[in-house]
């Protein structure tokens, strides 16, 4: 089954997220992440959600008209209302074109989760990371 079919089915059944269509650098099923002011990139997440308390993955796509090289990223998810995060540490794998695949994501309870992505640039190691978020309501 393709990711877009899995995503469409799961999105309708289990999860509600802020929707915005992806640009040409990401699949059409990807969701745009909200960026902080210092972000020189656009970020998109293609989610592979199944249900609460089941591991899932995310493919992250970063787009820019500038030639920005990403050194590394950090990924986490928290529940702001409960002031805690996931019980697991996700594994991040670099893909081609400066994109990343994240496995081992795990929402262990229903409610509002905030996906948090920190992006560190190669050429600007002293700069604070670019931050991106996506709110996901797990039901």
Image: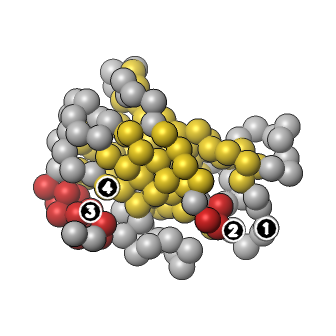
Residue linked to disc 3: 7
Distance from Cα at disc 4 to Cα at disc 3: 6 Å
Q: Of the two numbered discs 4 and 3 on the same chain, state the one appearing first in sequence.
A: 3
Residue found at the far left of this picture: 13
> Percent position (x, y) of residue 132?
56, 47
Q: Is residue 11 above or below residue 26?
A: above
Residue 57 seen in the current view: yes
Give the residue displayed 21% in from the left and 34% down from the top.
53
Residue linked to disc 4: 48
Q: Is residue 11 above or below residue 136?
A: below
Viewer-proximal residue among 45 and 55: 55
Q: Is residue 4 above or below residue 24?
A: above
Relative to 44, 37 lies left or right: right
Distance from Cα at disc 4 to Cα at disc 1: 29 Å
Q: Nearer the viewer, mark 2 or mark 3?
A: 3
The quadrant where residue 30 appears = bottom left
Q: Tell me how many marks there are.
A: 4
Residue 112 seen in the current view: no
Residue linked to disc 2: 64
Q: Quadrant of the N terminus?
A: bottom left
Q: Are marks 2 and 1 in contact (CB under 8 Å)?
A: yes
> Percent position (x, y) of residue 28?
40, 75
SS assignment at label 3: helix
Q: Of the two numbered discs 4 and 1 on the same chain, state the one appearing first in sequence.
A: 4
């Amino acid at each position: 089954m393709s990711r877009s079919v899995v995503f469409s089915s799961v999105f309708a059944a289990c999860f509600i997220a802020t929707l915005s269509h992806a640009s040409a650098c990401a699949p059409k099923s990807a969701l745009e992440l909200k960026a902080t002011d210092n972000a020189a990139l656009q970020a998109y997440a293609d989610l592979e959600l199944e249900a609460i308390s089941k591991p899932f993955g995310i493919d992250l796509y970063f787009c820019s008209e500038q030639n920005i090289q990403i050194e590394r990223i950090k990924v986490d998810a928290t529940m702001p209302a409960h002031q805690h995060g996931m019980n697991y540490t996700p594994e991040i794998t670099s893909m081609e074109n400066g994109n990343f695949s994240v496995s081992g994501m795990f929402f262990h309870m229903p409610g509002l989760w905030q996906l948090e992505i920190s992006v560190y640039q190669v050429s600007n190691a002293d700069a604070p990371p670019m931050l991106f978020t996506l709110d996901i309501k797990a039901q």
